[in-house]
Amino acid sequence: MNSGNLLTKISLREKAAYGCGDFASSMFWKLFSMFLLFFYTDIFGISAAAVGTMFLVTRVWDAINDPMMGIIADRTSTRWGKFRPYLLFVAVPFAIIGVLTFTTPDFDATGKLIYAYVTYTLMMMVYTAVNVPYSSLMGVMTNNTEERTSLASWRFIGAFSGGLFVTATANSLIEYFGENSTPATGYQFTIGVYAILAALFFMLTFAGTKERLKPALEGHSALKEDLKDITKNSPWFIMLGAGISVLIFNSLRDGSILYYFKYFIKDQTINFMGESYEFSHTALASAYMSIWLATNIIGVILAKPISAKIGKKNTFILSVVTSAILSFVIFFLQPNQLGLIFFSNILIGISAGIVLPLIWSMYADIADYSEWKTGRRATGLIFSSSSMSQKFGWTLGGALSGWLLAAFGFQANMEQTDQSLLGIRLMISIIAGIGALMALGFIYFYPLDEKYMSKIEIELDKARNGNK
């Protein structure tokens, strides 16, 4: 790594290689957020309330695990850099544990719950071990804030492409592999396909990227100093809250889609140009998921030009407010209004997609702010907080989904009552929208605008040039 003037332009090939890492992670992230709760209740056979509690309890360890991984990565030193080696060496364990998480053992109810706790916890550990270093890698590839936004956009193009690949193929693969067996077998073999692909894509990211950026003050800072610095970093706290809120919004939407279509929308007959077409609820759910992610990609692409015009903070505010308002509209739509249901999904997908690359780009700015204030650059620790916020948001959203289903009387694989259907509808609309508004409450106080960051970049560049 170098420490001089690193307002580096990143090649298209390296950006694409970086995006491959989130293609891999996001295949499993979408499996977790869109399929795992449904898998546990309708395939694996444990109650929605038990799943919700498990999602929350396992995060107690993960709350420690993410910053711990950031601290370890910051103190890693190899010929490949600090962060890239984890992409290589954790790829295979990630794939193996991914398959085990979606495997249904022949245990009684208690045994299944224990198995779910163990495999889910291990899955989150290996996810952390690869994703925290991957996230941190962007912070040391360049210090050019526009290139970071571009890298973040490529990252999310990879992320949404990976998620889109899953939503477009998962239900078909599950049916294919389970056709002559059981849905449980269908899930296990389907996840096996994604696991192999994930391992290969992590290795592509390792091979195609470089670490360049080195702190102005080289040396091994004490953990106590790093933790003390971050507790005084107000932009970090603000972004942590905003990130958790955004992921609550996404998690509630993602986790409720399969339930929404299976139990509320159901199978539909659509008349088009004088012809009638039959669509199962699984086909409709797959289409809805895929459109949601495809339009997210449009939002990701729009993030850079919009933020260049009005700034990252204002773009963030525009995104979450629009997502919240449109989500509230969904509550009033009925099963026979499929056109409006899908049209609102397109608009929400675009608006929600805009905010996601901004979060990662803003964390890179926060790492620069921390180095500017303290002379130390705890990149892994700061970026681990973004992974932590993802998991907290996803976990709180997942726990809320399970608890809400239970509170409204949900029973798997049965005709639902009006009350349980109300709970499903609230999850995908009103309650999800409240999560987006919570993000607005945090980001309003974010101080690192473009003018402030320009000053920081100039002063950090001088410090790095003076430390050659």
Image (spheres, rainbow, N blue to C red):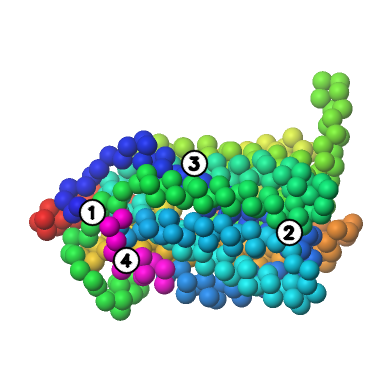
2 vs 4, front mark: 4
Does 71 appear in magenta?
Answer: yes
Label 2, label 4: how far apart the Cα atoms are: 37 Å
Q: Are marks 4 and 1 in contact (CB under 8 Å)?
A: no
Mark 1 falls on what kind of element? loop
Which kind of residue does numbered mark 3 sit on?
Ile
Q: CA distance from mark 3 to mark 1?
A: 27 Å
Magenta range is: 68-80
Q: Is residue 200 among the parts visible in the rendering?
A: yes
Q: Amino acid at mark 2?
A: Phe
x and y percentages locating residue 271 in the rendered image: 84, 28
Q: Which residue is mark 1?
A: 1
- Disc 4: which residue: 76
Residue hosting label 2: 39
Residue at the image point whose x is 63% and y is 45% from the top = 166
**Residue 164 falls within the magenta-colored stretch:** no
Q: Secondary structure at mark 4?
A: loop
Residue placed most toward the observer, 78 or 346: 78
Q: Is residue 402 above or below residue 292?
A: below
What residue is shown at x 42% (from left), y 64% (from top)?
384
Farthest top residue in view: 273
Packing grade of label 4 (10 A; few <14, some 14-19, many >=20) is few
- C-alpha distance separating marks 4 and 1: 13 Å
Asked if labels 2 and 3 touch by Cβ distance under 8 angstroms, the answer is no
User: Residue 407: x and y, percent?
Assistant: 77, 69
Say left or right for 134 vs 298: left
Single out the mark in the foreground, 3 or 1.
1
Q: Secondary structure at mark 2?
A: helix
Q: Choose the circle earlier in sequence order: 3 or 2.
A: 2
Residue assigned mark 3? 157
Number of dots carrying numbers: 4
